[in-house]
Image (cartoon, rainbow, N blue to C red):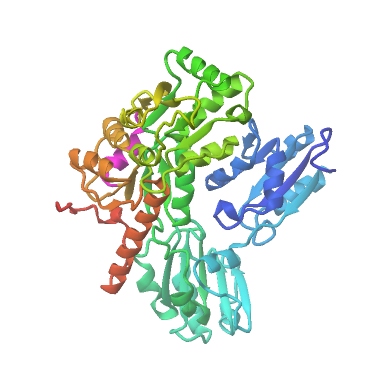
Amino acid sequence: MSPDSPTSGSVAFVGAGPGDPNLLTLRAAELLGKADVVVLDEERHGPLLRHCREGVEVATADLVKHAEAGRFVVRVCEGDPMLFSSITEEVAACAAAEVDFEIVPGVPPATAVLTYAGIPAATAVPEFRVVDAAQEQDWSSHAACPGTLVVYNGLADAVAIGKALIAGGRADTTPVAVTSGGTTTEQHTVVTSLGRLQADLKHAGATEPALMVVGDAVGRRDTLSWFETKPLFGWRVLVPRTKEQSKSLSEQLVSYGAVPEEVPTISVEPPRTPQQMDRAIKGLVTGRYEWVAFTSANAVKAVREKFEEYGLDARAFAGLKVAAVGDATARALVEFGVKPDLLPSGEQSSEGLVAEWPPYDSMLDPINRVLLPRADISTDTLVAGLTELGWECDDVTAYRTVRAAPPPAPIREAIKGGGFDAVLFTSSSTVRNLVGIAGKPHNVTVIAVIGPQTASTAEEFGLRVDVMADKPSASALAAALAEYGAKQRQAALAAGDTPRRPSQNRRGARRRAK
């Protein structure tokens, strides 16, 4: 019976893929979205729960019992459920209980991990063979494999397997790659040969899940490696922003191979007295203003929420001119259904906005008043500039920014102890608030700032600034950090060294002042 049927229970066994949660199949994501119960036995599959609806039950067993109670159960399986899987008994139990089931293939590690390691397993080779070392194997027959041999569950016995393959006739110079944590930002690949397996794996720190790849295809890794060579691969990057603001920045960091950690330092709250905003929205609708100027995405959000409270939508902006201080604010307006009429072409700041704002002209402008819905801690730069241009400003507190609660102890310890490779500061307030709630970042942590004012604040707190964005936007800041990471990697390789993350240099490392 279909999982869409509300009166009967069923079970779907879905492959979780090789490790990267973004490699989940569309069918698996669809079924997770319908699940009443999700059965997990791997903690690392937790990110897949984002596909589930709110209130889904997470269990570790009893899938048949849940299905017999009329519930739709999704059993998340490692890799591909039908490739070296241990779920056959669970499937048999469903069949014996006459519980309907479905099996959804997953992306198998045998191909995905090799692709992420830059090894073309089945390109220009006569054979591609996959074996499970947990089962008894005739390694002499595998030694005769003329192509690529992929070994599951072989890390503990890798040295013995290498010796058996050599004894079976494989040359001791045959290339070997051992990849652990495949397709995740913990991925690490050791490239060696059958004869050097013992020496090179001894201090490599490889852990299961891992794949062992034997064959000439391993040699192509030098030119085809694309994942582990990302500019910020494996970097743990602190993103001290509000939760709403950090999402797009974190996604960009992930694209560079980083592991972003969002730590809110600022909490956005409604104004203490909402009457001022109420009057401003009323004036906006009744034609009191010629312009509305937004200086942050939070201001857009505050006005949008007020609109929804009064049953209004973007049509209320008809006849008004709208200004945005920068790209992020403009995007928030466009999502609201409003296209800004004015956006700085140069510096994205209050100064940049004033530089391009037209002076008040009584012949052209029937109304000389501007609405500025802003934070309670905003400066007077914009008001002063617009007043000088002949405009009257209603400077309205749309939201308050307050210091967030301290992060959990492990995060605070990582900040002060050098557990983070970099921290991105997108404003002076994020510097002050992070230091206030968690302490100063360790001296090996790369400090990246959005502009000169934020840099000055960081230096006031004794932090050395390593990276500054070429323009004041969070996206430009992430790109600047990626460029910094790429240069550090290139310098290490040019010197014949293995690239290291900043956090790996914290023992005995000290920052030198500029």
Residue with the most extreme left position? 513
Residue 460 located left or right of residue 12 = left
Quarter occupied by residue 67? top right
Look at the picture and state if 140 lies above or below 213. Answer: below
Give the residue displayed 18% in from the left and 41% down from the top: 462
Give the residue displayed 72% in from the left and 51% down from the top: 27
- Residue 259 in the image, given as x and y percentages of width and height: 43, 50
Give the residue displayed 46% in from the left and 44% down from the top: 327
- Residue 176 in the image, given as x and y percentages of width and height: 47, 76
Numbered label tally: 0
Q: Main secondary structure of the magenta part?
A: helix
Q: Is residue 215 visible?
A: no
Residue 265 located left or right of residue 72 = left
Front residue (pair 209, 477) = 477
On the rendered image, what quadrant is the N terminus found in? top right
Quarter occupied by residue 262? top left
- Residue 440 in the image, given as x and y percentages of width and height: 24, 39
Q: Which residues are magenta?
A: 406-418
Residue 89 located left or right of residue 268 = right
Look at the picture and state if 446 lies above or below 155. Answer: above
